[in-house]
Amino acid sequence: MGADIKSLRTRIKSVKSTLQLTNAMGLVASSKIRRATEAMQKSGAYAAAVSDAVSLLVASPECRKSPYMRQSEGARTRLLVIAGDRGLAGGYNANVFRLAKEYPEAQLIPIGKKAGDRFGEETLSSEKCSGADAAALARHLCEEFAAGEYDRLGILYTQYHSMLSQQAAVKWVLPLTRDENAPTRSVLFEPDAAQILQAAVPEYLTGQIVAAIRESFCSEVAARRMAMDSAGKNAQQMLDDLQLSYNQARQGTITQEITEIVAGAGS
């Protein structure tokens, strides 16, 4: 019985330690949510504005011969895969990796330490990526696409729907495509639409990359918060069960000691 009590005491101490850790990580995640959401909204608004401008350019007949509108039947695909820099975020990273398996022929470009661990050294940090870092990657990718080194470029990221819902998805960003159903607008470009498009595409791609990274990070923080809340509840339930078992074992020991004392006094 003594050994059981000692074992229960050790387990209670261990679970308490785990509970403190999950609570601390949950608080850290909570403190990051507001900033991550603001960054996601700002980068998303900028990416949408640049995308609208590029859509106007793409609709111009002058841009149809742009290398960025080259439609190829080839299957040379590059995929930016955005995962987290850290783990303990529920199924966040696993969902990204599961979707990446659906593109076995793609050349994967990892962003985030966990993606780097899985697919090779990461290109950018998913938490600390700067606009300048994303711009450098975007320029490099644009140059290689224009040179015909690959046929299409996608971004595998995690869409943020709410604190309870995040979903891995792929957004295709190159080649540029023209929306035939979009309303026509008369816009005058100076010096001409083709030159402006040539200069705008790297900025457009930078905006798409930054927006996807910011949205993925917001999703990661939300997933970690929910995972830590769930882990904390499970740890508390386990702690309550262990404490009950400990009290019962302790009570049994005390009862046995009293019985032995009474029996010894009566002999």
Image (cartoon, rainbow, N blue to C red):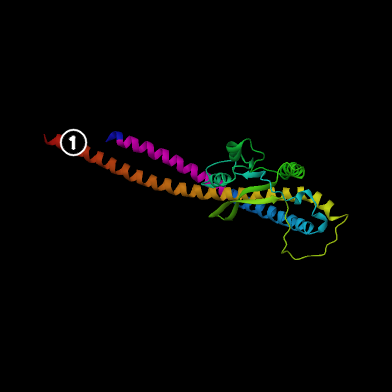
Question: Which residue is most to the front?
Answer: 73
Q: Quadrant of the N terminus?
A: top left
Identify the magenta region: 4-30
User: How far across and how far down the image is residue 43, in percent?
Assistant: 69, 52
Label 1 sits on residue: 260
* Residue located 75% across and 55% down the image: 50
User: How far across and how far down the image is residue 30, in percent?
Assistant: 56, 50
In the displayed structure, does residue 240 sit left or right of residue 262?
Answer: right
In the displayed structure, does residue 43 sit left or right of residue 160?
Answer: right
Amino acid type, label 1: Glu
User: How far across and how far down the image is residue 251, in percent?
Assistant: 27, 42
State the predominant SS element of the stretch in magenta. helix
In the displayed structure, does residue 202 sit left or right of residue 188?
Answer: left
Residue 181 picture quarter? bottom right
Most foreground residue, 199 or 217: 199
Q: Is residue 243 visible?
A: yes
Residue 45 picture quarter? bottom right
126 over 52 or under it: above or below: above
Q: Secondary structure at mark 1?
A: helix
Q: Quadrant of the C terminus?
A: top left
* Residue located 42% across and 38% down the image: 14
Question: Which residue is most to the left?
Answer: 267
118 over 59 or under it: above or below: above
Most foreground residue, 237 or 46: 46
Circle 1 Cα neighbour tier, 10 Å, few/some/many (<14 / 14–19 / ≥20): few
* Residue located 36% across and 37% down the image: 9
Magenta run includes residue 118: no
* Residue located 25% across and 41% down the image: 252
